[in-house]
């Protein structure tokens, strides 16, 4: 058997290198993603704290801009997901030249899409912030902040693309290290640019946006240097494949757009959930915010192992080894359920001390404890649906996770609204609906992945020659 080398030739593969065990491959991919997500979460916390030292208007203006950016990032995540899956499938097939071509094209299209978006966003920043109906000083801060952060879109998309491509090659440590360095730089830059320290200009709230832009520019540059030099025999160095290829963009978006739509619908569903809870009063809304913070941290293992499943299942598609993909997904599911289950037990037991870290209001504590304990009980089910969704994306099927997850979330919001509106439900009932819907979503995703792997296995065993793969799991 011969494998394709990065320059398009072939390499003798009769002596295969020793491969790590499946458990090690899953864990080695997952833990850096968990660490990277944690760093990004803490970065937002630190930035928010520094801006909050300025004024209430500053934190409100920045908050409006961040909400806009949240939806933009969710939409652009299509590029990162599509790139990661396609590169993983090509790498699994040992088509290294193809993987390099896909990585180059992903970067080209990220620039072609993000630059016009950034320019448009810059000029429309004022009208966009105006939609929030804020006071004049808040709107002014929000507009200035959004104009700078729209420039961040370009480097942010490159980070998504670069990180996704490297994870597709099995390297999740490089994106984590780059993110860690960028976060450290961001803290010093942001503090200096907000308050005018160490000879830097005092820019106020917009200094936070400039600090984030410059630190992410550094991170994107470092990631491109790594990709230029290459990982796992795949490098973007060279003159070929830099002209835009519509076919590659189409393949990336075919996989990525459903994933991006899923992110947008998820964000909209949780926004609606906040609106529902807001009708219960200030104490309930504060409790909801605290429960959501706990939830965001407890989700990190699920995100990490879900991304690992996407990369490893994608590689197994390229290698035409359904057994490897199925085993990787099973291991990732067990790890995710164990970690999130433990976090659920801890947060259930320590619910009251956790709430007291944020508030001493008796009403907030009472409502918050109920919300956190319900969230804790749902952890194992969310662990399963995160990983099974990731495994499905590795197969190239992003449409089914979109339907299952978005449908499940919006059904949850509908039931929660009915519980509050017609049955006098409280915040515990709102979050408690997830105890009904999340097990159903988890089972539906698990059964669908199992079915697709079974069909894929039958096809591979029936036709052992390397012919074209099924549409849902094809490598362009």
Image (cartoon, rainbow, N blue to C red):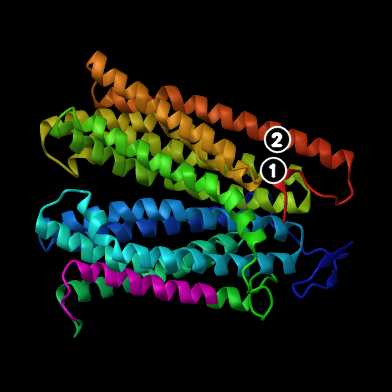
Looking at the image, which residue is at 70% across and 71% down?
233
First in sequence, mark 2 or 1: give its number: 2
Task: Count all numbered tags in the image, as a single digit.
Answer: 2
Extent of the magenta region:
201-224
Which quarter shows the C terminus?
A: bottom right
Q: Closer to the observer: label 2 or label 1?
A: 1
Q: Badges 2 and 1: C-beta atoms under 8 Å apart?
A: yes
In percent of the image, x 29 and y 51: which residue is there?
A: 67
Is 127 part of what is drawn in magenta? Answer: no
Q: Is residue 164 left or right of residue 237?
A: left
Mark 1 is surrounded, within 10 Å at the Cα level, by few (under 14), some (14 to 19) or many (20 or more) other residues, namely: some
Which residue, given by chain and number where applicable, does mark 1 sit on? 472
* Disc on res. 227: none
* Nearer to the camera, 361 or 224: 224
Q: Is residue 92 above or below residue 218?
A: above
Circle 2 residue: 452
């Amino acid at each position: 058997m011969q494998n394709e080398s990065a320059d398009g030739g072939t390499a003798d593969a009769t002596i295969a290198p020793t491969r790590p065990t499946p458990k090690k491959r899953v864990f080695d991919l997952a833990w850096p993603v968990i660490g990277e997500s944690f760093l990004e979460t803490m970065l937002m916390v630190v930035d928010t704290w520094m801006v909050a030292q300025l004024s209430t208007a500053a934190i409100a203006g920045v908050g409006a801009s961040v909400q806009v950016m949240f939806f933009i990032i969710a939409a652009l995540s299509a590029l990162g997901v599509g790139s990661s899956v396609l590169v993983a499938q090509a790498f699994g097939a040992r088509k290294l030249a193809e993987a390099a071509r896909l990585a180059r094209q992903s970067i080209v299209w990220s620039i072609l899409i993000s630059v016009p978006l950034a320019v448009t966003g810059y000029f429309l920043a004022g009208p966009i912030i105006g939609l929030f109906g804020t006071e004049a000083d808040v709107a002014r801060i929000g507009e200035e902040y959004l104009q700078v952060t729209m420039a961040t879109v370009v480097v942010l998309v490159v980070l998504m693309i670069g990180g996704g491509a490297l994870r597709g090659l099995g390297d999740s440590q490089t994106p984590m290290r780059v993110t860690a360095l960028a976060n450290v730089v961001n803290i010093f830059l942001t503090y200096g640019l907000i308050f005018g320290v160490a000879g830097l200009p005092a820019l106020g709230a917009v200094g936070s946006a400039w600090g984030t832009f410059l630190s992410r520019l550094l991170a994107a540059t470092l990631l491109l240097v790594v990709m230029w030099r290459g990982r796992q025999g795949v490098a973007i160095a060279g003159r070929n494949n830099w002209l835009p290829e519509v076919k590659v963009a189409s393949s990336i978006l075919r996989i990525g757009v459903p994933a991006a739509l899923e992110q947008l619908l998820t964000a909209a569903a949780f926004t609606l959930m906040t609106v529902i809870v807001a009708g219960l009063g200030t104490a309930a809304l504060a409790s909801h915010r605290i429960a959501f913070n706990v939830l965001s941290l407890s989700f990190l293992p699920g995100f990490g192992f879900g991304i690992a499943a996407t990369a490893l299942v994608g590689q197994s598609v390229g290698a035409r080894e359904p057994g490897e993909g199925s085993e990787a997904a099973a291991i990732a599911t067990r790890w995710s359920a164990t970690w999130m289950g433990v976090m659920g037990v801890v947060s259930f037991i320590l619910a009251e001390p956790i709430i007291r870290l944020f508030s001493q209001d008796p009403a907030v504590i009472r409502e918050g404890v109920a919300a956190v304990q319900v969230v804790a009980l749902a952890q194992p089910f969310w662990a399963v649906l995160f990983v099974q969704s990731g495994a499905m994306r590795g197969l190239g099927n992003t449409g089914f996770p979109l339907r299952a997850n978005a449908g499940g979330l919006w059904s949850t919001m509908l039931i929660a609204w009915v519980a509050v509106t017609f049955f006098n439900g409280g915040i515990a009932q709102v979050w408690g609906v997830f105890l009904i819907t999340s097990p159903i979503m988890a089972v539906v995703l698990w059964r669908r992945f199992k079915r697709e792997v079974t069909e894929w296995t039958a096809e591979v065993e029936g036709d052992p020659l390397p012919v074209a793969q099924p549409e849902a799991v094809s490598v362009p």
